[in-house]
Structures are given as structure tokens and as C-alpha cells.
Amino acid sequence: MAARKEDIGAGIGPGTMADRADRHELYEEAVQDVEQECEFITDTFRELRGRDALSFREDFCGTASAACEWVRQNSRRTAIGVDIDPQVLEWGRQHRVGRLNSEQQQRVKLVEGDVLSARTQPVDVVGAFNFSYYVFKDRTRLRKYFAAARDALGPDGLFILDAFGGHEAFEEMKEKTKYDNFTYIWDQAEYYPITGEYVCHIHFKFPDGSKMKQAFSYEWRLWTLPEIRELLSEAGFRKVTVYWEGTDEDGEGNGEFEPEEKGEADAGWIVYIVAQP
């Protein structure tokens, strides 16, 4: 769901645009594309399993936008959102679940808990998007999470996650993207090659000159695709497929993801990974 102008500080009121802005709305406008995520889940599950996915668990759900979009698209669907942060879950209840109609709200459940230990009903799909699982910095904990995701699936379920990389991912740099009412700044502040530790921030800048610095900060490990695939296999997934994004006539990403064995040495890339138990 795209953020509305009134939600991201474009309207009039006291203080600067940064003072009036909502960081969660800004994040969703700049970073998330829950419609595309749900479309990929829908198409991939149908292709691999020959039926429609109906139940979805969004791990590290934050504001639960993907979970809400999932139930909004189909009246037979249910969703579970799991996150450890009670404040962001409460924001999601008010601003995302609260925008659903009463019938749709009954099909969304938000769980405050650790994805390593949360117990929920088996689902068709577990999703871990926006690279949130990079928070696990050692192989043991990441493998434990992957095993927990596998255990949350039904008999023919799929675990779908995303990953990013490319040689620019290993650089300490800032990237700016302009939107109608703000500029999104992705700040790769620190990277340590020996440990793989990675510190990133998201900042926002507004037309009136005001700034929202470190609206979000992440202390991650920058995992590579071979490591992720190996750990998924060690966690009990029998088949792991990387879906690589195609390009348009200008060489830009076209939003279409297809299975790929090797990939390309692009400066930056984002992929989906589909793991089958």
C-alpha cells in the first residue's frame, strides 16, 4: 500500500515537514512493494504446487503491510504477522489492520514474539522480506531461524525470502532517491570484511530542508547467496531456487523474476529465494 500525502508530512501544520512525517509511512513508500511481493507469492506457489496459496505468515512483519495486502486480495486468505517489537505492531494494528474492513480484520492475526520460537498454525507460505533475517549474524542462529520457518509450513508449503548483493553492497556509501514529498537516503555506513558486520541507516530529507536522520538503523551481517542457500539446505530444505530479476530495454530491473542458476556480476541486485522442504 503506497503512503498517502497526508501521511508523510506533505500537509500543513506546526513544525517542519520532518516533524510532521510518519517514519513508517515514509518507509513503506520508499522501500516496500507489498503488492509485488504478494503477486510473486501467488504466482510462484501456483506454479510449483498447482493450487492457490491461502495462508501466509509474514515474519519480521513490522507494520504487517504484506499480511494486510494478502488478505485484501482474496476473501479466502488468512495471514499471521510475527514481530518482536510491540510498538511497531501497535502502529500496524492502528494504521494497516485498522484500514481493513471488519471481515478482513478477522483474517489477520498479529503475534508479538521471536521468530526463532513463535508457534503458529501451519501455513502455505512463510515470508521473510526486506532482508530482516540479516539480523542473525552467525550461522547457528540463521540456520535455527530457517529451521523454525520450515517447521511453520504445511506439508507442501514454501519459504520465500529476499536477498541483496552486488559489489556496491560492500561499499560504505549513500544512495539518494527523490520522491514527490521527500528524498530517501540509504546509508551503508559501516562494513567489516572479516566479520561481515554491516551497519546501515535510512534517512529522509524534505523540501523545506528539514531531515529525519537515522529514521531506521540496522546492524546486520551481509550474507551472500551461497551462504544462504547452504544454510537453507542444512536447515532441511531439499530444494532452494534463486529467482533473478530481468531487465527492460534500458537495462533497468523490470520486476519480473525467473529461476536462475548463476546470476550476473551486477553492481547491485535483489533476488527472491524460494525454499521447498
Image (cartoon, helix red, strand yellow):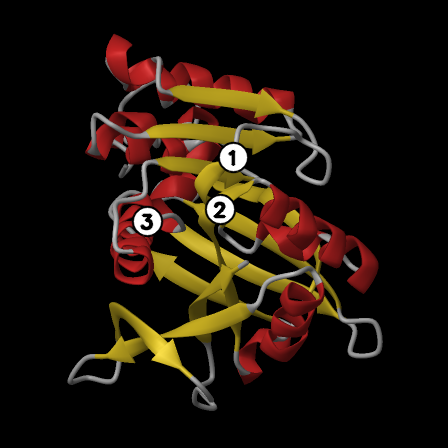
Give the SS element for disc 3: loop
- From the image, tell me which residue sits under label 1: 122
Against 55, residue 14 (above or below) is: above
Q: Nearer the viewer, residue 245 or 25?
A: 245
Query: What numbered label is drawn on residue 161?
Result: none
> Visible in this render: residue 234?
yes
Residue 78 placement: quadrant? top left
Q: Amino acid at mark 3?
A: Asp
Q: Earlier in the sequence, mark 1 or mark 3?
A: 3
Query: x, y (%) of residue 64?
Result: 44, 31
Q: Nearer the viewer, residue 92 or 187?
A: 92
Q: Amino acid at mark 1?
A: Pro
- The answer to whether mark 2 and mark 3 are in CB contact below 8 A is no
Give the SS element for disc 1: loop
Tag count: 3
Q: Residues within 10 Å of mark 3 (few under 14, many from 20)?
A: some
Marks 2 and 1: which is nearer the front?
Answer: 2
Name the residue rendered at 29%, 42% in the picture: 181
Against 127, residue 229 (above or below) is: below
Query: What numbered label is drawn on residue 155?
Result: 2
Quote the CA–CA distance across marks 2 and 1: 9 Å
Q: Which quarter of the image is occupied by the C terminus? A: bottom right
Name the residue rendered at 39%, 33% in the picture: 67
